């Protein structure tokens, strides 16, 4: 019983440390930005592993695929599926459905990041949704 009284607070403290900040020395972690799949108003395929999304009127996100996603860079339409509820915050939260000549494909996202206004301004014409 005495061990439990000592061990439980220690485990609680360890859990708090484990769930704490993931910053490494000298670097700042980027804030997490989330969006709803229904808020995506346009997209542009960059290559077979990257797609840019316009969310709402002025927010832009870049999605990197887990691997090659054939046809994503030329298709006329895609479908977005949130795999974790209504908000998409990380690559694990998103699957992109792409029609193809042999049938629909499911492409898992690996990472998602919000583009800065400077990055959006620097996008080539075909890569800005």
Image (cartoon, helix red, strand yellow):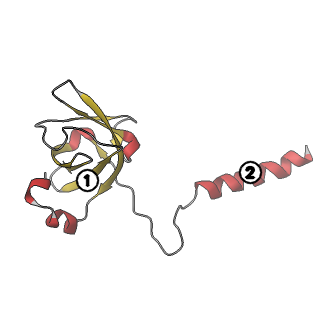
Residue drawn at 22 percent across, 26 percent down: 104
Nearer to me, 113 or 87 = 113
Residue 11 is tagged as 2
Nearer to me, 15 or 24 = 24
The reply, left or right, for residue 113 in relation to residue 29 is left
Instruction: For mark 1, give the secondary structure.
Output: strand
Give me the C-alpha separation between circle 1 and circle 2: 38 Å
Among the two numbered marks 1 and 2 on one chain, the one whose residue lies closer to the N terminus: 2
Instruction: For mark 2, give the secondary structure.
Output: helix
Categorize mark 1 by other alpha carbons within 10 Å: few (<14), some (14-19), many (20+).
many
Categorize mark 2 by other alpha carbons within 10 Å: few (<14), some (14-19), many (20+).
few
Residue 61 is tagged as 1
The reply, left or right, for residue 95 in relation to residue 39 is right
| Image position of 14 with respect to 36: above or below | below
Regarding residue 40, the answer to whether it shows in the image is: yes
Q: Which quadrant: the N terminus?
A: top right
Tell whether label 2 touches label 1 (CB within 8 Å).
Answer: no
Residue drawn at 21 percent across, 65 percent down: 119
| The quarter of the displayed image where residue 94 is located | top left
Nearer to me, 5 or 48 = 48
Regarding residue 128, the answer to whether it shows in the image is: no
Residue positioned most to the bottom: 26
On the image, the x and y values in percent for residue 95 come to 32, 36
Residue 111 is tagged as none
Residue drawn at 38 percent across, 40 percent down: 93
Front position among marks 1 and 2: 1
Residue positioned most to the top: 103
Residue drawn at 51 percent across, 66 percent down: 23
């Amino acid at each position: 019983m005495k061990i439990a009284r000592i061990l439980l607070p220690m485990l609680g403290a360890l859990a708090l440390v484990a769930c704490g900040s993931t910053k490494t020395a000298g670097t700042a972690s980027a804030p997490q930005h989330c969006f709803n799949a229904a808020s995506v108003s346009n997209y542009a395929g960059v290559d077979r592993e990257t797609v840019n999304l316009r969310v709402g009127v002025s927010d832009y996100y870049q999605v990197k695929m887990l691997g090659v996603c054939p046809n994503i860079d030329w298709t006329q339409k895609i479908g977005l599926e949130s795999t974790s509820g209504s908000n998409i915050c990380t690559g694990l939260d998103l699957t992109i459905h792409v029609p193809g000549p042999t049938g629909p494909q499911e492409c898992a996202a690996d990472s998602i990041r919000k583009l800065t206004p400077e990055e959006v301004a620097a996008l080539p014409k075909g890569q800005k949704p």
